[in-house]
Image (cartoon, rainbow, N blue to C red):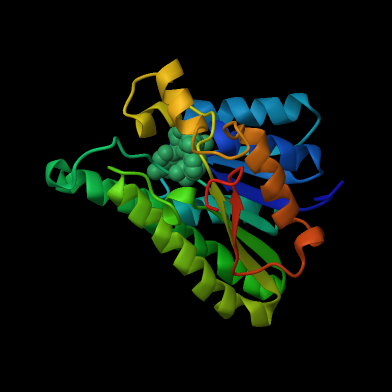
Amino acid sequence: MKLKDKVALVTGAGSGIGQASALLFAREGARVAVVDIDEGAAKATAQQIEKGGGQALPLRCDVSKAADSQAAVEQTLARWGRLDVFYANAGVPQWPTSVEDVEEATFDRIMAVNVKGVFLGAKYALPVMKRQKSGVFLITASTSAIRPRQGVQCYSASKGAVVTMTKSLAMECAPFGVRVVSIAPVATETPMLPTFMGKTAVDEEGRARYIATVPLGRLNTPEDVAKAALFLASEDAAMVTGSCIEIDGGRCI
Ligand SMILES: NC(=O)c1ccc[n+]([C@@H]2O[C@H](COP(=O)([O-])OP(=O)(O)OC[C@H]3O[C@@H](n4cnc5c(N)ncnc54)[C@H](O)[C@@H]3O)[C@@H](O)[C@H]2O)c1
């Protein structure tokens, strides 16, 4: 078990990559705070963990709100007394749009969740890890940070921001033995995927268009990303910090 006796908090754990990561972390021995803005989804993931014999704490939290983020960390500490892994994964997508047609509110919401949400997670989780002199802070970025697609200029900028934030946080935390790493998945089979394609549901045209851009010839499953997150959260990645790890079937080559 790679996370035996560890305490992990995963944001956006009600669906997709966050859910797959929370389930895998629990199977690998972690007690998991399952954080999501959708309380029902958080509870459903927590129930799945408990059914598998694990321990879970479902928490409703909007990561873009300081009070919510602080409360999520505090409630996790109150339950289990420590925090070994914080996975800042919650995010929102962007419908592909020419820049002149992007609403200011769209930009603001994407930045609030995808960038400020990560900052707030770091603000409240990293002091705990610094005190412990151990911990791993993971961030879900995107291949959009490295090789953006047309029409998602705000989303791509948000992911670029957290890749750079990762490097600065890694420098700040290294003296405390705390690692900070971002993960850049290519298109992943989750409820978010159709939005990137500018569709309400993934269809054959959208899937084929995306697969054509991935040298390995398929899209990610949420489990592909969860397995990378598990490796990075574990001692196996003890010398990895400040990096952005692409899980992309070669998309960024
Ligand atoms: N699906 C993809 O193609 C893809 C590719 C690269 C990166 N990503 C990134 O992966 C991460 C996870 O996305 P996913 O694909 O699993 O999508 P998803 O829609 O399946 O899951 C996202 C989860 O985040 C939650 N969430 C949204 N806003 C929130 C907020 N303000 N506070 C707390 N929770 C919130 C949602 O309720 C949902 O449960 C995101 O950061 C996304 O940008 C996704």
Residue 24 place in picture, x, y as percent: 73, 38
* x and y, in percent, of residue 170 in the image: 58, 73
Query: Residue lying furthest right in this view?
Result: 1
Q: Is 124 left or right of 197, judged from the image as shown?
A: right
Taking the image as drawn, is residue 79 in sight? no
Q: Residue at x 29, y 50 (%)?
A: 154
Q: Is residue 93 above or below residue 228?
A: above
Asked if residue 201 is positioned above or below residue 210 in the image, the reply reads above
What residue is drawn where x is 18% and y is 47%?
99
The single residue placed furthest to the bottom in the displayed view is 175
Is 123 positioned to the left or the right of 27 in the image?
Answer: left
State the image quarter where residue 150 is shown: top left
The residue positioned 59% from the left and 40% from the top of the image is: 215
- Please provide percent x and percent y for residue 58: 58, 36
Q: Is residue 94 visible?
A: yes
Pick the residue in front: 69 or 236: 236
On screen, residue 145 versus residue 82, left or right, reads: left
Q: Quadrant of residue 239?
A: bottom right
Tell me: residue 43, above or below residue 131: above
Q: Is residue 232 above or below residue 178?
A: above
Count of numbered labels shown in the rendering: 0
Residue 103, located in which quarter of the rendered image?
A: top left
Residue in the picture at 60% in, 65% down: 243
